[in-house]
Amino acid sequence: MDDASDIVIRVKGLRNAFGTHVVHDDLDLEVRRGEIIGVVGGSGTGKSVLLRTISGLQRPSAGSVDVLGVDVLNADEDTRSALEARWGVMFQDGALFSSLTVRENVEVPMRAVIGLDPDVRRHLADLKISLTGLPYLAGDKYPSELSGGMRKRAGLARALALDPEIVFLDEPTAGLDPIGATAFDNLIKGLSEAMGLTVFLVTHDLDTLHAVCDRIAVLAEKKVLVTGTMQEMMKVDHPWVHDYFHGPRARAALDATEQDQG
Amino acid sequence: MDGVDEQMMERPEFSIEDADDGDGIALAGVLSIKVVSRLDAALGALPVQDTRLDLSGVTHVDTAGAWSILGLERRLESAGQTLDITGASKTAAQLIETVRNALPDPQEAEDGKQSVADRLEAFGQGVVASAGYGLALVNYLGLFVARLGRAIRHPGTFRMTALVHHCQEVGLKAVPIVSLMAFLIGVVLAFQGSAQLRQFGAEVFVVDLIAISILRELGILLTSIIVAGRTASAFTAAIGSMKMREEIDAMRTLGLDPATVLFVPRILALVLMLPILGLIANVMGLLGGAIMSWVELGISPAMFRTRLVEGTDISHVMVGMVKAPVFALIIGIIGCHAGMQVESNAESLGRQTSNAVVAAIFAVIVADAGFSIFFAQMGI
């Protein structure tokens, strides 16, 4: 699995700074094909900034970002746009275009596909909407008519529109009730298996980490402090990591997972 | 069968042909969203009969490809035939299975057609809603007067700092734009008036024209329209964003009355400032008219002044100024009311802000027409 060709995201020596405030310094991270990696860290450790940097929304002051073998920071326009068709981003509240219906939102990335029949496009959008667990009629609704959980699902449907190889999820379960969050966890897990997705998710939700993630990367002290499975995290003795994974909430989440498995 | 394979290098391609053993159809290549339109057409052209579909030559299939294969399966099954999919790789089979479970069941949206009764009902509801809007504005007026009365009885509850701040916002900061607007209106009136009056050799009456139209109508009306544009929207945006972030609810739980804290200082500031702005507009309008008359008609400033004092009754100024506080109330109440109608999303904030501006300008013009009729009937 550690074969170099199986690394789909490689971040090296990344530095992000806002004015004098340094968020990342000499940060390294590797993500393997087909895995679900969860990025955790305290507030202000730059989890979302890291996601934005890898997906090309934010230019770092130093370092390199390789996604699917493309140098994101120095690629020319054509390479970039070809790359963008191979990843999808789901923003925290879905970031759906408010003037378009859900179906039209999902169709937006598909419009870039040359020679795609509008009728087929419409059916495919309906399929993506249904894949993310939304009812059929949700496709005709506008984002403002949907609940927060449904907007997230619609955002995921748009991110999956072109069957990307990588999806970036920013706080996928934030603001959802426990039932909705669990359903979303299962959705991510199921889709990543069925579609062979690599999932990069930023979260605070310990249940998601337990239930979904193959590996966890902890952001602290301006870099990726440790990466590893849940079990490995439990053994790390860095104070923040220890508190995070041994707090009462972490225990509850771990118990729940063990019950599910046992 | 259909040889769709076109020798194109960059684009992923697929092929569809009879299987080697002469039994069934063999798909090969990449079945992705880029070729799905052609794939779907090719599969759609297959005859309706029991079919075996061999996917062993397929290198990659995505949800679009799987959707297309399942479309064929549905079509055959609805005709009582079967589709036997063989040779699919493990991932492809899993994907096809996932897509099969997720295939949407098209449902008709509710009938969108409207009968005559529906239209009548919508019209009736529109009338009731606009009457309700009028009532709500009267309600806000009552609320403002009641809270102002309470503030007068208990001066300690009155927010002097807020009042001064809003006076600066709605009054002082509007002076440049109002002055410039009024000055230019004076210039335009003198210019147009002189062109017409010169035909009758009655150039000197341009002074009366400018003075009466500006003092009586235009000065205060146009000032109110500008203030409606900049202040009603500002009130709606400020109160609306507080409403959006639940600050208004927080105030209520803390025992603060939104009407006292938010409405009274804002509307009162407007009531105090609009007459002053109107007066400034009057002066600037006359100044613009005087300068243009001098340049265009040779009416010297001294002559303009004499003609103005002798020919224009002070009642014109009073008629103009008496309207100012009323317009101020209208603008302030509409702005505050719209702000309170904002819901918890950003779209409603934008919608209410533009509604407030349109409603305020419209109401000011309607009120002005009402004043005109009233003064004409009273012979003032």
Image (cartoon, rainbow, N blue to C red):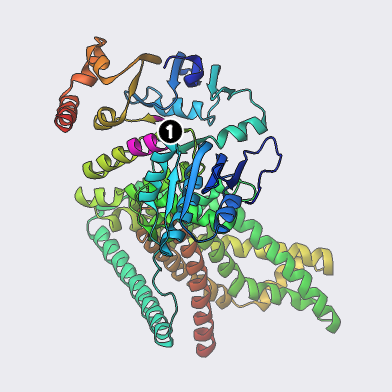
Q: In the shown orientation, is residue B102 left or right of residue A242?
A: right
Above/below status of B297 relative to A11 = below
- Which of the 4 quarters of the picture holds residue A102? bottom left
The furthest residue to the top: A237
Residue at the spot of label 1: A197
Residue in the foreground of this view, choosing between A224 and B122: A224
Q: How many numbered marks are there?
A: 1
Q: Which residue is drawn at 43% across and 49% down?
A: B84
Q: Main secondary structure of the magenta part?
A: helix
A190 falls in the magenta region? yes
Label 1 lies in what chain? A
Q: In the shown orientation, is residue B356 left or right of residue B311?
A: left
Residue A71 pos. (x, y %): 59, 22
Residue B27 pos. (x, y %): 55, 43
* Stretch of the chain drawn in magenta: A188-200
Residue B210 pos. (x, y %): 69, 72
Q: Say what amino acid the circle numbered 1 marks.
A: Leu
User: Can residue B268 be seen?
Assistant: no
- Which of the 4 quarters of the picture holds residue B332? bottom left
Above/below status of A49 relative to B129 = above
